[in-house]
Amino acid sequence: MKFKLSFLLLNLVVLSVCAQNLKSAGDRYFFQYKYEQAVKEYEKESKETVLTTQQFLNYAEAYFNTKQFKKAWQTYEMILESDAIVTPFHYNKMLRSLYAISGKDEMNKYLENDTILKEASWAENAKFNFDIENKKDVVLPNYTIFNIKGNSIAADFSPSFYKDKLLFTSDRVLTLAKKKKKKEERIYLDIYESEIEDDGDITNVKPYNSIPKANFHEATPYYSAELDKLFYVLSNEKNGEMLYDEKGKNALSIAEVDRNNRFNFILKHLSTSFYYPFYDANSQRLYFAANFEDSSYGGTDIYYVNTSNGQIMSAPINLGPRVNTPGNEISPFVFENGLYFSSDVFYGYGGMDIYKSNLKADGSAGVPINLGKGINSAKDDFGFIVKNNTTGGLEGYFSSNRDGGKGKDDIYGFTVAEKPKLNTIVLQGKTLNPLTNIRVGNVAIKVLDQNNKVIKELESAEDGSYEIEVPWQEKITVIASKKKYSLFRQFYTAEELKNKKQTPIYLDFADDFVVEKEGKSMLKLNKFIFKTKSSKLTPDIIKELDKAITIIKKFPEFNLQIESHTDSKGGSSSNFRISQARADNIKKYLLNNGIPSKNILYTIGYGEDHVLNKCVNGVYCIDYFHAENRRCNIVVLNYKELY
């Protein structure tokens, strides 16, 4: 397995030292990565004594690493049935075993009752990737992939662009020497350089000699053109001897070498290994992989430190559970706001797969999307690097131990004629009251695909912020709602969202449009009156009714009663007739302009029955006071019941 060689090999000395103190033969073989022997010894020991929970977990992992997936699954199931704790790291291997023996559908059924994957983003990531895989209209990039001529029978992996050359890691010299001597020797990794030919192949491979020579591992280089520095990992050593912690562990550090060949350790710890450095000049972050026991979500996670022109300015920061999983994440690489990395999480194709997460404005990462078959295989794929080519497409390299290679790990080149489309749609912004621009928190948001199927549901945060990421669609509809707020419904195309950084969602507050008057809840409109003895709508009346139409469409749940009142001048019967005609004409206008009839329950002309002052029949009043009684109201009958 490539991952054992190119990643775990880096700790082989450490674990060999630790294994000397283990009494169980199964444990000794397990920590020496001799999994076939470990399986045999654990099987023997389980008949003679009771294995500890940790030994059963080792036993299951040894089955997994020797591709005995059914036995791995059965052993993990037995551990769970005994009520022992199975960490997410082992649960990931358990799920991968089920995937291997029963397929994706059975694994998804099992996940429905999951109680171990406590991070909601892990299950969401899985569903997201499975949904993309199942979409019939997804067009995968047409990658042209080739095995480079410079590969050897040894392990060649983790390529890095270096000016007009290519750097990579290999154990080719010692592997060949070992093959000739036919005896067991320690294999250490070294960094090599090569020329890049016009077709992307490499030639003239030779050791890279622009770094201080070390006696042990030197691996996974990354060259930063902006800093003109090379970052790489190497074994902790002093005066030609390995350095060990109090437990006998030798770890790997990250060092840098500048243009003047000045060497400096930048991340070093006797007990913690650091892997796969990558410097992003735009964010000035130095990314790397590590397994900090107090902050790792599974095995190795991807971390970063903030820098100032490469000078470290912060403690290591975990990228979080959106990227880091119960499995192992390695080899980060940033290109055009996309974070590429590899993971052996349970929803991949097998082994390590290469994923891409969109990096947001705040530096956080979006849902990791599998790059698909071709770039990924049933084996281990990692060390992905990419750049623009001269024809508008992309070119790059990655490492794999897929079938058909020349050695234990090979470097593969690839080209793609056109840049792939966005594989996700991202919306982010705030839910706001448009009148006040005040944030509205805890808003329910749904995203529908072009077939009006709900593909995402969430709630905005208390501060009104929200973030949505869904599999790529040509068109989506966003619906947002909250009690006592208007319904938001907006249609978007993928193209218009492509470069949109903020997508605000506006919800009107009902109390801003309703007022309590005359003991009733009414639409908040400017007062409008009809001309004397007329029921004809004037431009001023229409202006206010158009406002009413806008409000009613915002709040389609309103049940309305249209009321018209006159003063006490004239006869009572004529006042009733004219007020009813006015109420009816208001209703007619609303219906003709898109208000459903179900919203208007009643139209009532009250005539002079409900004057607001003492200006009744037989009482002298100046017209100013009579005017107070001439009015029309649109009453919301169910306002208090609704809210």
Image (tube, grey):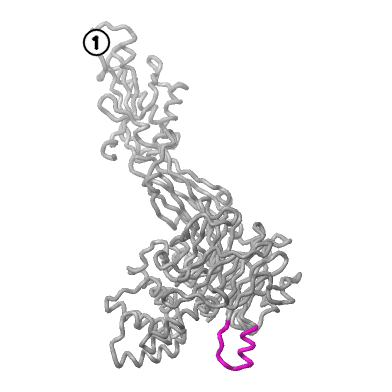
The structure residue drawn at horizontal position 43% and vertical position 62%, both measured from the top left corner, is 321
Residue 480: x and y in percent read 41, 47
Q: Is residue 311 left or right of residue 51?
A: right
Q: Nearer the viewer, residue 593 or 381?
A: 381
Give the answer, above or below, for where 220 lies relative to 606: below
Q: Residue furthest front?
A: 239
Farthest residue toward the right?
Answer: 198
Report if residue 194 is visible in the image.
yes
Check if residue 578 falls in the magenta segment: no
Q: Quadrant of residue 159?
A: bottom right
In the figure, residue 555 lies in which quadrant? Answer: top left
Q: Give, as a three-letter code, the residue at label 1.
A: Asn
| Badge 1 element | loop
Q: Quadrant of the C terminus?
A: top left
Look at the image and give the residue range highlighted in magenta.
Answer: 173-187
Q: Nearer the viewer, residue 426 or 37?
A: 37
